[in-house]
Image: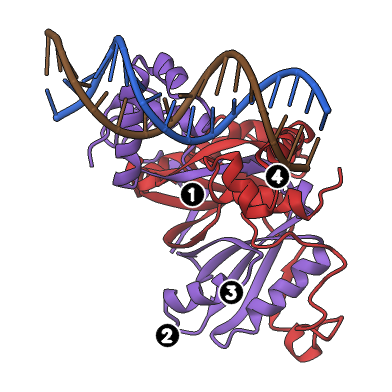
Chain colours: A red, B purple, C blue, D brown
Amino acid sequence: MELDRLDRDIIAALVDDARQTYAEIGHRVGLSASAVKRRVDRLREAGAITGFSARVAPQALGWTTEAYVELFCQGKTKPSDIALAVAKCPEVVAAATITGEADALVHIRATDVRHVERVIERLAAEAFVVRTKSSIVLSRLVDLPPGAVPDAPLPGRAEAGSDPFAGPVPDERNRTQVVG
Amino acid sequence: MELDRLDRDIIAALVDDARQTYAEIGHRVGLSASAVKRRVDRLREAGAITGFSARVAPQALGWTTEAYVELFCQGKTKPSDIALAVAKCPEVVAAATITGEADALVHIRATDVRHVERVIERLAAEAFVVRTKSSIVLSRLVDLPPGAVPDAPLPGRAEAGSDPFAGPVPDERNRTQVVG
DNA sequence: CATGAAAATTTAAGTCA
DNA sequence: TGACTTAAATTTTCATG
C-alpha cells in the first residue's frame, strides 16, 4: 500500500492523540473532516492502523518493575516454539528473536524484583531453554508508543546532509559491535 | 491513587479498544455511560491513563527493521546524559538504564540494516559511549501496547497456587543468570 | 460521594453533487 | 474531495440512594 504525506500526517496525529475529532485532524493536515474519516477507514482496512489504545502508566497499575531476559535455546528451537512459550506469560510485553549470542530477547513487566524472578523461573522451565541472562531496568529513559515516529522515513532520503560518508569512518567502526 | 476493580476493568477495556463508546464500556464493566466517563476523566487527571494512541504497523510506514543496542558508558556517565543523547535520535523508540555489563539498552526502529548501522554510529559518537553491542531483531514474537495486561496485579496475590515455593528451586536456580 | 437518567451540544457516519 | 443530513456519542446538569 502506498502512503502519501497526508496519510502519514494523519497517522502521526492519531498516534499523538487518538481521540481528536476528524475536524481537528483535518485542520491539522489541511483536509475536511469527511476526507480524514475516509482516509482513516482506508488506513484501518489496509492494516496500517491496527487499532486504538489507551496509554497507561504501568506504575499506576502496580507494575513498577521491568526487565529484559535473554533466552539461550537449544540448537533446533523454532521461533514459533519461543513464541508459544512467551505468549503463555502475561508478564511478557514484548519478545523477539535476535542476532547475537542469545536467541531471543524478552521484555517483561512485574510488580517487583521477586516477581521478576518468578517469571524468569517460568521462562527457564521451558524445555528448549538452556539458560537465561537478565537485566533489570533501573530507569526508563524513553518509551514511545509503537508507531510514534517524528517523521516518516523515506528509504532514499537517508541523512545525506548530516552524514556525508556512505560507509562508517574506519576509526569509529571498531567502537561498535554488531553481533550476529 | 487507589484503583478498584471497576477502574482496572475500564482501563483494560480502553487498552483493548480506545474507541469504544462509554456505553459499550459501561455494559462490559457493569456501569452507566456517565459513570464510566467520570471514572475515565478521573483516571486521566490522576495520570493512570496518559492518553490515547493509534496502534500502527511500523512496516506500513517503512520501518521494517529493528534492533537493540547496548551502550557501555564511561564510569561517571549520568542517566540524564544518556537520556538526552537517545532523545536526539528519532529512531529510538525505547531506552532504559539497566543492570549488568551494559549501562543502557536502546531499542531502535529503522528502514533497513544500513539505517540501523547509521543510528548505531550516531549513538556511538556520543562522548560518554565507550562501545556498543547490537542485536538485530529477526522476528517480532510479541508486541503488546504498554499497559495491556490481562489482569491487574495485586502485589500480595502472587501465584501462591501455581507456584508453591517461595524461593527458587536450587536445582533450577543455576539455569538462570540475573546480571547486576 | 458516586451513581443513573435526563438534557443540550458535539461528533460520527452516510449520501449527495 | 467537500458539503449536507441523519444518527449516535459526548458532555453537562440534576435528582437519587
What's the residue type where badge 2 is placed?
Lys
Label 1: chain letter = B
Closer to the chain start, of discs 2 and 4, is 2
> Could you say which quadrant of the image residue A161 lies in?
bottom right
Instruction: Report helix, strand or loop for mark 4.
Output: strand
Callout in the foreground (2, 3)? 3
Q: CA distance from mark 2 to mark 3?
A: 21 Å
Q: CA distance from mark 4 to mark 1?
A: 28 Å
Callout in the foreground (2, 1)? 2
Do discs 4 and 1 belong to a common subunit? yes
> Could you say which quadrant of the image residue A139 lies in?
bottom left
Q: Are marks 2 and 3 in contact (CB under 8 Å)?
A: no
Residue that mark 2 sits on: B76
Q: Nearer the viewer, residue B116 or A8?
A: A8
Q: CA distance from mark 1 to mark 3?
A: 40 Å
Closer to the chain start, of discs 1 and 3, is 3
Residue that mark 4 sits on: B140
Do discs 2 and 4 belong to a common subunit? yes
